[in-house]
């Protein structure tokens, strides 16, 4: 907290000094999310005080079309406004959470049944018809808003989006592609795109982790067994493709592993999702998922975490942001740290949930 101050930590290279981003950037909720978990577990007021303003600072971007906000308002407002309201009852935080849910709902394309992901593509191309696997993690904001307001439209939109990814986004073997492209006018499915993965038919490892965790969240919010089955298929694909130390390379289908970086953030996300999947899965599978999560967390703790370098801000090394674009390769990423903390908190018996 001393090193971060009012900054919004996003990533760090091997110096361990966090680089900051603006509060509209998609990762702005993860540092405050960790603080809210610490507050919930310890009731130490310093964490609450430090996290308090974060949703306040993000809110103006919801009315700023030139800003960077997009479908990732779930990643931003669930670990800030929504958990803040849950833990403190703050009505302004509830209002901000609902405003973010309305913003997300407004990105729904009824013809195609998907939530539009980005405002422009990586090369500046128009992307009104693009939806991405990561968005499953944003759906709990809609489910939460539905419960808060009693309005079924939020869940209707979330379910349409999840169903679209079940239909077009998940392959027979449980792997997923990053981007689905639709004709935004007719809603017709056009193609899958590799996005942050190696290729359209490869298996970006963080995308697999988002699918594992995201479909589980859809199951927890709806009770629909198709989503539990999808989460299990994603988990089985993920686990059966891990290298010996339980931390994946950035894509599960690389032509060669020579010189290729890992993505420890994918392992942290998957481990946290697996701990919840272990509770939801049929009894015969529960131990498998629990053991796998603990094995991955142990490897992250022993092989990727930095405990002994004063001034080194992040927890995990060995994360990869966007390998195809060469952004943040083999570094530390704030969301890797967040999901590591979230998973460890669950393992320690923390019962509240931020992502559903
Ligand atoms: N949600 C963006 C990413 O996983 O990099």
Image: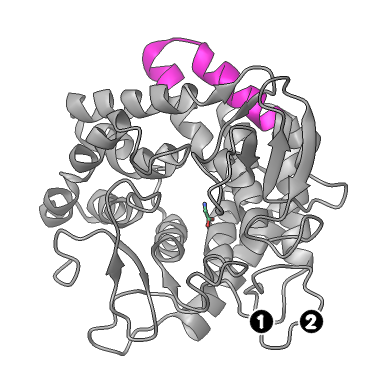
Q: Name the residue under label 2.
A: 256
Q: Quadrant of the N terminus?
A: bottom left
The number of numbered badges drawn on the structure is 2
| CB within 8 Å, label 1 to label 2 | yes
Q: Residue at x 53, y 48 (%)?
A: 124
Instruction: Please state if 190 lies on the left or on the right of 101 as rendered.
Output: right
Residue 36 seen = yes
Q: Quadrant of residue 348?
A: bottom left
Q: Nearer the viewer, residue 335 or 331?
A: 331
Write down the region rendered in magenta.
145-163
In x, y percent, where is residue 325? 57, 67
Which dot marks residue 133? none
In x, y percent, where is residue 69? 38, 40
Real-space Cα separation, disc 1 to disc 2, in angstroms: 8 Å
Task: Look at the image and say whether residue 162 sits in the magenta stretch.
Answer: yes
Q: Which residue is drawn at 67% across and 46% down?
A: 179
**Does 130 sit above or below residue 244?**
above
Q: Quadrant of residue 199?
A: bottom right
Q: Name the residue under label 1.
A: 260
């Amino acid at each position: 907290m001393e090193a971060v101050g009012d900054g919004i930590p996003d990533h760090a290279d091997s110096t361990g000094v966090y680089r900051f981003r603006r509060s509209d950037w998609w990762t702005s909720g993860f540092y405050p999310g960790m603080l809210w978990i610490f507050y919930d577990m310890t009731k130490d007021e310093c964490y609450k005080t430090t996290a308090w303003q974060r949703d306040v600072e993000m809110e103006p971007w919801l009315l700023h079309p030139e800003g960077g906000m997009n479908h990732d308002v779930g990643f931003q407002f669930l670990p800030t406004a929504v958990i803040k309201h849950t833990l403190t009852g703050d009505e302004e935080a509830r209002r901000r959470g609902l405003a973010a849910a309305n913003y997300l709902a407004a990105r729904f394309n009824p013809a195609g049944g998907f939530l539009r992901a980005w405002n422009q593509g990586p090369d500046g191309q128009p992307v009104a018809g693009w939806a991405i696997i990561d968005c499953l993690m944003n759906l709990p904001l809609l489910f939460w808003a539905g419960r808060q307001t009693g309005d079924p439209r939020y869940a209707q939109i979330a379910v349409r989006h999840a169903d679209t990814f079940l239909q077009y986004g998940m392959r027979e073997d449980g792997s997923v592609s990053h981007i689905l492209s639709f004709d935004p006018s007719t809603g017709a499915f056009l193609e899958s795109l590799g996005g942050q993965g190696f290729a359209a038919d490869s298996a970006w490892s963080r995308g697999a982790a988002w699918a594992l965790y995201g479909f589980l969240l859809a199951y927890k919010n709806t009770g629909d067994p198709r989503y539990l089955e999808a989460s299990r298929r994603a988990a089985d694909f993920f686990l059966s493709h891990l290298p010996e130390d339980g931390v994946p390379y950035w894509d599960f289908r690389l032509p060669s592993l020579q010189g290729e970086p890992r993505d420890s953030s994918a392992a942290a996300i998957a481990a946290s999702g697996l701990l919840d999947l272990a509770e939801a899965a049929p009894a015969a599978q529960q131990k498998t998922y629990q053991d796998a999560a603990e094995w991955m967390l142990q490897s992250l703790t022993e092989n990727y975490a930095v405990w002994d370098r004063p001034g080194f801000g992040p927890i995990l090394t060995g994360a990869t942001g966007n390998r195809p674009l060469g952004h943040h390769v083999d570094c530390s990423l704030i969301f890797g740290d967040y999901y590591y903390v979230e998973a460890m908190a669950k393992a320690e018996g923390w019962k509240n949930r931020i992502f559903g």
